[in-house]
Image (cartoon, coloured by chain):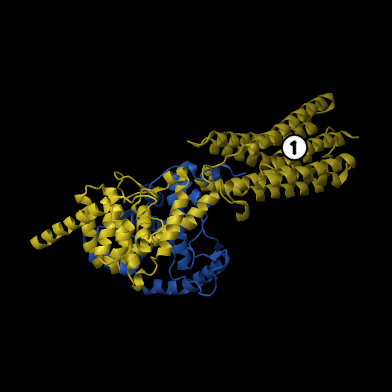
């Protein structure tokens, strides 16, 4: 997952100084929000709420439908590029050696997200990889202010609630902010992928499809 | 017994009967967070009305306090329902909003403000009542104008929020494609909340009549309104009871789905991605000749595309499982067997096995989606385990398909498995001989093609 942040090259000395004053204040408030903002990992029921926002709750859908609905909601373009690496075994070898099954790139200026996956992946892994990368977009992981690095020792894996980070301007589907720890963001993207796969397969047979029609 | 005590006795009895009905018929079979809360609330209402019926608290500020306490259960119900619709309950109680609310943030904001606004209005009404006491419990007694202010302060927001919640329930019930059971359930809750809104209006009118009407007209009007209120309260309780009693059991249980997510899906994704990495990085060279020969042999024997894919998946698995390098250490017989057993567990449930599927490629709707059964991996796991890890005991149970023999011959030729063991396992039958012939023909064709290159 990579973000191409827009370049701002018109900063004069005055603006730089202003930014210098502003940064400690902003960091102070961010630190406070970091301490206070915690949440647990996404549940299947909460994912159903996201599907409802996308108009997919209780419906059978393919990953393509999820991608299109997410793009519409986030008001961005999402392009999925399946690399035809089966014709180039050396390329497949290099991709496999890199240990990454997929890559998400986001160009903020162009409102464009591009997902790259090797076409030689087994179909289920290909589907889950694309859904995983879409999960990062839904969570708003690409909108994190990257200068807000979390303290490495302020969380423990066994904790039920995890620290989140504030976002810069942009739209996300998830209710909560992204996690501060990258491993948790990856874990949640995996969860979103598996929830999406099952919700898409089961449609209105999903046990979570009607949770939002049965709130009492 | 004063009129106020009499009214309290009637309302207390109704509440107690409702509480008993709840305990006996609903709470056991339909225990939700709301039903538990409503049961506690009903008991609280019964106790408050009972206390008022037994002890004459009329007069002064005590009367105001009791009157406000009698309003509190309904206020709490409205606040809870609004918060539940907004998805604002604590996570442990389930914090999903109603479907129409999830798509409209402004609805969530309005409903989420209910507890604060309602409790503030109750506080304000209490303050007004304590500053200007009025005969709040003496139902038919004339009252000063401040009494209308006191009532309106509580009833206006209560009417607004309960009416709002009734509309949201209707919106939820009207969702396209919704099961009828949910339609009726939401309709019942909507009726219940609508009744509360009407009671709030009626209560304010009641207070107004006590201020502005006098003599026999007042008494008759108030008695009529009291009857209306009783009917509305009964309808409200019955509507909520009906709504809570309507249950829906999903076709797939939540626990089963969780098990699939954390068990099978995770295992299969991990296994397939590790196998892909191992095949691409380590076993690719060793496999290229063997897999070409397998494909060609399958073509010579006229096997289907799906059988050819199964044969390819099997030869890949055998190659990786037999490879001693560290890159393939996770693709073991144990891992393969564990995944195969998880797949078998899904296949035991026909409905579930047919529903869980995934596309064969991105935006390739022309191709049939794969299922656990139809994906090449399932049969490939069994075949690879038979070839790599078989002690010869299970043979003879069923005759393997021809593609299995072709893979066995190819794997033996590539020294991935012991040829003697293969001969023993496959018992040199007609299928085996056909596979050997096809494989030799395939090798010959490939050699010719290589020579031409």
Residue B428 vs residue A74, the one in the foreground:
B428
Residue at point 37%, 57% (across, down): B381
From the viewer's perspective, is residue B9 above or below residue B326? above
**Rendered image quadrant of residue A186:** bottom left
Residue at 71% across / 38% down in the picture? B25
The colour applied to the residues of chain A in this rendering is blue
Please provide percent x and percent y for residue B339.
43, 58
| Local SS, label 1 | helix
Question: Could you say which is closer to the camera, residue B23 or residue B317?
Answer: B317
Chain whose colour in the figure is yellow:
B
Which residue position holds label 1? B21
Seen in the image, is B244 located left or right of residue A75?
right
Work out whether A147 lies above or below A121: below
- Callout count: 1
- The answer to whether residue A212 shows anywhere in this view is yes
Name the residue rendered at 52%, 48% in the picture. Answer: B105
Q: In the rendered view of the protein, which quadrant contains the C terminus of chain A? A: top right
Residue B375: give x, y in percent of width and height.
Answer: 35, 51
Q: Is residue B225 left or right of residue B87?
A: right
Image location (x, y in percent) of residue A68: 36, 48
């Amino acid at each position: 997952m990579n973000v191409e942040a827009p370049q701002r090259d018109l900063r004069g000395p005055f603006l730089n100084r202003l930014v210098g004053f502003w940064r400690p204040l902003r960091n102070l408030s961010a630190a406070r929000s970091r301490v206070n903002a915690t949440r647990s990992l996404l549940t299947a029921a909460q994912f159903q709420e996201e599907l409802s926002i996308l108009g997919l709750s209780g419906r059978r859908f393919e990953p393509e439908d999820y991608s299109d609905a997410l793009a519409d909601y986030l008001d961005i373009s999402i392009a999925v590029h399946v690399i035809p690496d089966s014709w180039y075994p050396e390329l497949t070898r290099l991709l496999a050696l890199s240990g990454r099954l997929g890559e998400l790139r986001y160009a903020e200026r162009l409102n464009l997200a591009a997902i790259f996956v090797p076409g030689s992946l087994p179909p289920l892994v290909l589907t889950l990889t694309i859904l995983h990368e879409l999960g990062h977009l839904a969570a708003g992981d690409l909108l994190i202010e990257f200068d807000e690095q979390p303290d490495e020792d302020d969380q423990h894996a066994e904790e039920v609630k995890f620290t989140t980070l504030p976002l810069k301007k942009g739209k996300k589907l998830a209710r909560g902010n992204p996690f501060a720890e990258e491993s948790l963001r990856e874990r949640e993207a995996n969860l979103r992928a598996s929830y999406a796969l099952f919700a898409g397969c089961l449609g209105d047979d999903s046990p979570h499809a009607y949770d939002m029609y049965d709130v009492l | 017994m004063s009129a106020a005590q009499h009214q309290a006795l009637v309302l207390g009895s109704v509440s107690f009967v409702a509480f008993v009905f709840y305990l006996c018929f609903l709470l056991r079979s339909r225990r939700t967070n709301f039903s538990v809360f409503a049961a506690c609330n009903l008991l609280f209402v019964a106790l408050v009305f009972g206390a008022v019926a037994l002890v004459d608290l009329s007069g002064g500020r005590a009367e105001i306090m009791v009157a406000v306490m009698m309003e509190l259960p309904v206020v709490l119900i409205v606040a809870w329902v609004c918060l539940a619709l907004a998805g604002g309950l604590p996570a442990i109680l389930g914090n999903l909003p109603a479907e129409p609310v999830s798509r409209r943030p402004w609805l969530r904001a309005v409903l989420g403000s209910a507890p604060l606004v309602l409790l503030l209005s109750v506080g304000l009404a209490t303050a007004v009542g304590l500053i200007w006491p009025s005969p709040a419990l003496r139902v038919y007694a004339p009252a000063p104008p401040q009494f209308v202010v006191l009532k309106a302060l509580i009833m206006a927001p209560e009417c607004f929020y309960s009416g709002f919640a009734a509309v949201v329930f209707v919106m939820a019930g009207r969702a396209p494609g919704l099961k009828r059971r949910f339609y009726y359930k939401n309709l019942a809750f909507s009726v219940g909340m609508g009744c509360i809104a009407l009671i709030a209006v009626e209560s304010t009118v009641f207070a107004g009549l006590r201020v502005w009407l006098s003599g026999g007209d007042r008494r008759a009007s108030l008695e009529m309104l009291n009857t209306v209120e009783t009917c509305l309260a009964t309808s409200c309780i019955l509507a909520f009871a009906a709504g809570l009693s309507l249950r829906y059991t999903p076709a797939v249980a939540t626990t089963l789905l969780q098990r699939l997510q954390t068990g099978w899906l995770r295992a299969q994704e991990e296994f397939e991605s590790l196998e892909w990495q191992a095949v691409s990085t380590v076993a690719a060279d060793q496999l290229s000749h063997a897999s070409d020969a397998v494909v060609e042999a399958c073509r010579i024997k006229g096997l289907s595309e799906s059988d050819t894919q199964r044969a390819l998946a099997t030869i890949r698995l055998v190659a990786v499982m037999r490879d001693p390098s560290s890159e393939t250490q996770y693709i073991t017989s144990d891992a393969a067997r564990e995944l195969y057993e998880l797949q078998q567990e899904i296949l035991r449930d026909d409905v579930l096995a047919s529903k869980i599927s995934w596309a064969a490629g991105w935006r390739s709707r022309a191709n049939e989606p794969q299922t656990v059964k139809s994906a090449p991996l399932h049969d490939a796991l069994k075949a690879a385990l038979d070839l790599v890890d078989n002690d010869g005991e299970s043979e003879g149970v069923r005759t393997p398909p021809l593609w299995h023999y072709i893979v066995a011959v190819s794997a033996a030729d590539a020294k991935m498995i012991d040829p003697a063991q293969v001969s023993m396992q496959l018992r040199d039958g007609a299928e085996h001989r056909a596979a050997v012939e096809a494989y030799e023909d395939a090798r010959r064709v490939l050699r010719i093609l290589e020579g031409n290159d």
